[in-house]
Image (cartoon, rainbow, N blue to C red):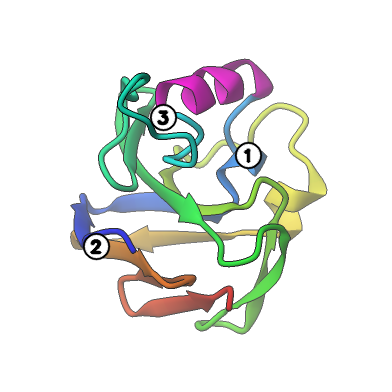
């Protein structure tokens, strides 16, 4: 379980962050977050990880691990599927421009939402809470 965090209002990509974050940044983020908290140890504290929060392009992001790894999970609003290939679901600030060479995972496996107010996010036992939306990975 992560504690509740508040992200600022804005446009977000909700889904596996690997579909939005370019390959050249992905490994850096993985190393800086100790792979989104999966490899935490006293010997190797992460550079950029706070119980689900990390930074990309100078902006605050959230990600956590699904209950059982990769798969397709239902997004409660709009009955859309969230595709997962990295074992994580996140909410990542999005400037409205699709990434170069955007994959099907970006186009079909995530949701783009604008939040006009700050948004609370957290994960509890494989259930992701994103504002009033829920993604169950159990």
Q: Residues within 10 Å of mark 3 (few under 14, many from 20)?
A: many
Q: Give 27 or 42, whichever is nearer the viewer.
A: 42
Q: Give 117 or 49, whichever is nearer the viewer.
A: 49
Residue at 63% over, 15% down: 24
* Residue named by callout 2: 119
* Residue named by callout 3: 33
Residue at 62% over, 84% down: 79
Horizontal relation, residue 65 to residue 100: left or right: left
Q: Is residue 101 above or below residue 32?
A: below
Residue at 30% over, 50% down: 10
Q: CA distance from mark 1 to mark 2?
A: 21 Å
Q: Main secondary structure of the magenta part?
A: helix
Q: Earlier in the sequence, mark 3 or mark 1?
A: 1
Residue 1 part of the magenta-drawn span: no
Q: Earlier in the sequence, mark 2 or mark 3?
A: 3
- Residue 93 occupies which quadrant of the picture? top left
Callout 1 secondary element = helix
Q: CA distance from mark 3 to mark 1?
A: 14 Å
Q: Which residues are magenta?
A: 23-33
Residue 94: where, in percent of width, then height? Answer: 45, 42
Residue 25 part of the magenta-drawn span: yes
Residue at 41% over, 21% down: 32
Residue 40: where, in percent of width, then height? Answer: 40, 34
Callout 2 secondary element = strand
- Identify the mark at residue 18; answer none if there is no mark: 1
């Amino acid at each position: 379980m992560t504690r509740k965090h508040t992200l600022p209002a804005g446009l977000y990509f909700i889904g596996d962050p690997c579909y939005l974050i370019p390959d050249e940044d992905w490994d850096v983020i993985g190393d800086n977050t100790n792979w989104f908290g999966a490899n935490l140890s006293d010997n190797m504290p992460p550079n950029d990880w706070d119980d689900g929060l990390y930074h990309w392009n100078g902006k605050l992001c959230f990600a956590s691990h699904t209950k059982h790894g990769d798969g397709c999970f239902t997004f409660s609003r709009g009955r859309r599927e969230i595709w997962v290939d990295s074992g994580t679901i996140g909410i990542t600030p999005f400037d409205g421009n699709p990434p170069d060479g955007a994959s099907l995972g970006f186009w079909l496996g995530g949701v783009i939402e604008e939040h006009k107010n700050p948004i609370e996010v957290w994960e509890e036992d494989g259930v992701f809470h994103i504002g009033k939306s829920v993604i169950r990975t159990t």
